[in-house]
Image (cartoon, rainbow, N blue to C red):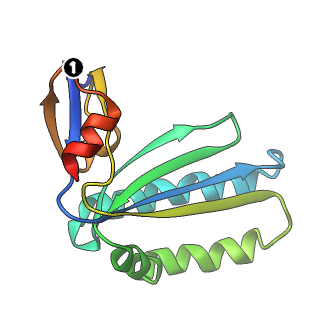
Amino acid sequence: MPEIFPGRWTADIEGDFVVFLIGMRVNRPWKLRKVAFMARTMPKLLRELADDPAFGCLGSWQAIHSPVAPVVVQYWRSFDDLEAYAHALTHNAMWKRYFQLVKADGDIGIWHETFKVRAREYECVYGGMPRFGLATAGEHRGLGSASQARQRLDERA
């Protein structure tokens, strides 16, 4: 079980960074071959990113939006790093296979959203949680109990 940090905590990342959300939606779950391909592919890519910090992925976590729609949240050092990984060998091979197998037939939908975050223009709070979210990618530090979101943002400016 992960370590729980009592009290309030926040996360800091030095400099600008990128938040990348990516997910899929299984529209036709009976298409088992396609579902299995997608279910195997993302964990493989995430292991590759975790094993090699040179790619620039600072951390990631996964959630299930619904039984048919997993989501991955990734934190990247820069958009250039994210873009370079999109052209990397493993990702390119997966992308080609995806288009061969799934194409645009609607059996499985995919999506992503990219957000560039400027240094010190974010805030986050975790209470009674293990390291989570941005705290998995940056510095995890204790936070006083009296601060509010606006105050934390103003202090960063």
Image position of 80 with respect to 107: above or below: below
State the residue in front, 103 or 64.
64
State the residue in front, 116 or 4.
116
State the residue in front, 13 or 51.
13
State the residue in front, 28 or 76.
76
Q: Quadrant of residue 61?
A: top left
Q: Position of residue 50 (x, y in %)?
A: 29, 58
Tag 1: Cα neighbours inside 10 Å, few (<14), some, or many (≥20)? Answer: few
Q: Residue at point 66% right, 71% down?
A: 98
Q: Amino acid at mark 1?
A: Ala
Q: Residue at point 17% right, 59% down?
A: 14
Image position of 87 with respect to 121: above or below: below
Q: Quadrant of residue 145?
A: top left
Residue holding disc 1? 146
Q: Position of residue 19 (x, y in %)?
A: 41, 58
| Left or right: where 47 falls relative to 128 | right
Q: Position of residue 69 (x, y in %)?
A: 66, 43
| Left or right: where 5 falls relative to 40 | left
| Left or right: where 140 falls relative to 32 | left
Quadrant showing the N terminus: top left
Image position of 50 with respect to 82: above or below: above
Q: Residue at point 27% right, 69% down?
A: 56
